[in-house]
Every structure is written in structure tokens, then in C-alpha cells.
């Protein structure tokens, strides 16, 4: 049995009921603010939190669309491997990694220049990619070979920054 004594208890119960039973209209409903046309069959998307640049993997056009997060416009289109499905960003290094499903590779793009700087052979049918922001290591899920490929190496903290930067030493 609930026993209320005094006005403070009644006001506390009413405040609790108001918080629990708040009307749904008080919630903010998300809305689409822009529609951006990119390449054929966009699959994966990643955002560089430092620059606000958005990268979209376009599977059927074998490209990555680069979008300005400030203007919501495509600023570049970069050709990568066959059937890119996933993309990830290392904001500390300024690099973008694209998993190319049919070519069994990962394309590495410079976020500064927008140029393809490397192609790394990984397992069969890579379809997922992620960057560990603490170490800079890149993990690639290879669906057909049931493996995860690890790209990259250690990072060190610069004395003048809080974000990790790529190390110049090899493993």
C-alpha cells in the first residue's frame, strides 16, 4: 500500500507521473532535410567527425562519393575497387577505407587530397570495415573466407594533441 504524507510527497508523485506519462507530442520527430544524388547503389556511409566530410560507397558504379557536410553537395567522385560496400574513416590520420566486395581489396583514400593512395588485398568478399580510433588499426570482415583482416599499426599520442596520430614506426 502506498502511503503519502504531506504535500512534498504528493508533488513528488505528480512529478514522477508527469515524467513517466509525458505526451508523445513532446518528443522531437526527425525529418529529412536534404536528398543528395550519389553513384549507383549506395551501400555504406561514414562521416569524418573532424572535417564533417561524408563518404558513400556506391556498389554498382565502383566509386565513393565525397559529400560536404556543410553544403550537402557532392564535391568529388573517387574510383575504387569492384563493388564497394562499406566505408570507414580514421579521423586522426585523415584516411578513408573502402571494402571492395568483388575484388577482395580495401581501397585507402587520402581525406586531404581525395586521391586513392593504396589498395590492400584482404580476404574473400570483404563487406564490412571499421577503424579503432585508439590504435588506428583497421578491421575488415571477409564474409566468404570467414575471417577478419587487420590493416595498420600502432599510433602514438602527439604531446600537443588529444587525438591519436599515425605512428612512423612499423610493427
Image (cartoon, rainbow, N blue to C red):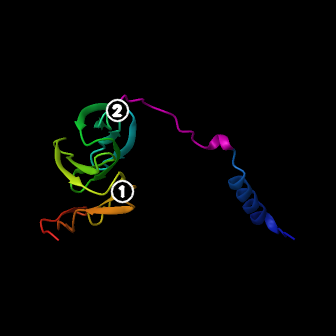
- Element assignment for label 2: loop
Q: Nearer the viewer, residue 18 or 69?
A: 69
Instruction: Tell me what residue is drawn at x 29 percent, y 31 percent.
Output: 74
Q: Which of 123 and 92 is in front in this view?
A: 123
Q: Measuring from the top left, give residue 28's x and y in whole percent.
A: 57, 41
- Residue 79 occupies which quadrant of the picture? top left
Q: Measuring from the top left, give residue 88's x and y in whole percent.
A: 32, 51
Q: Mark 1 points at which residue?
A: 142
Q: Nearer the viewer, residue 77 or 23?
A: 77
> Is residue 10 shown above or below 69?
below
Instruction: Tell me what residue is drawn at x 32 percent, y 45 percent.
Output: 102
The overriding secondary structure of the stretch rendered in magenta is: loop
Q: Measuring from the top left, give residue 121's x and y in whole percent.
A: 23, 54
Q: Give the range drawn in magenta.
A: 24-37
**Left or right: 21 with respect to 159?**
right
Mark 1 or 2: in front is: 1
Q: Is residue 27 magenta?
A: yes
**Left or right: 35 with respect to 100?**
right
Amino acid at each position: 500500500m502506498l502511503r503519502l504524507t504531506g504535500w512534498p510527497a504528493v508533488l513528488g508523485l505528480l512529478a514522477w507521473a508527469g515524467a513517466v506519462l509525458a505526451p508523445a507530442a513532446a518528443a522531437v520527430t526527425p525529418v529529412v532535410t536534404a536528398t543528395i544524388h550519389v553513384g549507383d547503389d549506395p551501400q555504406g556511409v561514414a562521416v569524418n567527425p573532424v572535417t564533417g566530410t561524408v563518404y558513400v560507397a556506391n556498389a554498382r558504379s565502383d566509386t565513393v562519393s565525397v559529400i560536404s557536410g556543410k553544403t550537402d553537395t557532392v564535391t568529388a567522385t573517387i574510383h575504387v575497387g569492384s563493388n564497394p560496400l562499406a566505408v570507414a574513416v580514421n579521423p586522426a590520420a585523415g584516411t578513408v577505407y573502402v571494402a571492395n566486395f568483388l575484388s577482395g581489396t580495401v581501397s585507402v583514400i587520402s581525406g586531404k587530397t581525395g586521391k586513392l593512395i593504396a589498395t590492400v588485398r584482404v580476404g574473400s568478399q570483404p563487406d564490412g570495415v571499421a577503424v579503432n580510433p585508439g590504435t588506428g588499426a583497421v578491421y575488415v570482415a571477409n564474409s566468404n573466407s570467414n575471417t577478419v583482416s587487420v590493416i595498420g599499426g600502432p599510433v602514438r599520442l602527439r604531446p600537443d594533441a588529444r587525438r591519436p596520430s599515425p605512428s612512423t614506426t612499423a610493427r
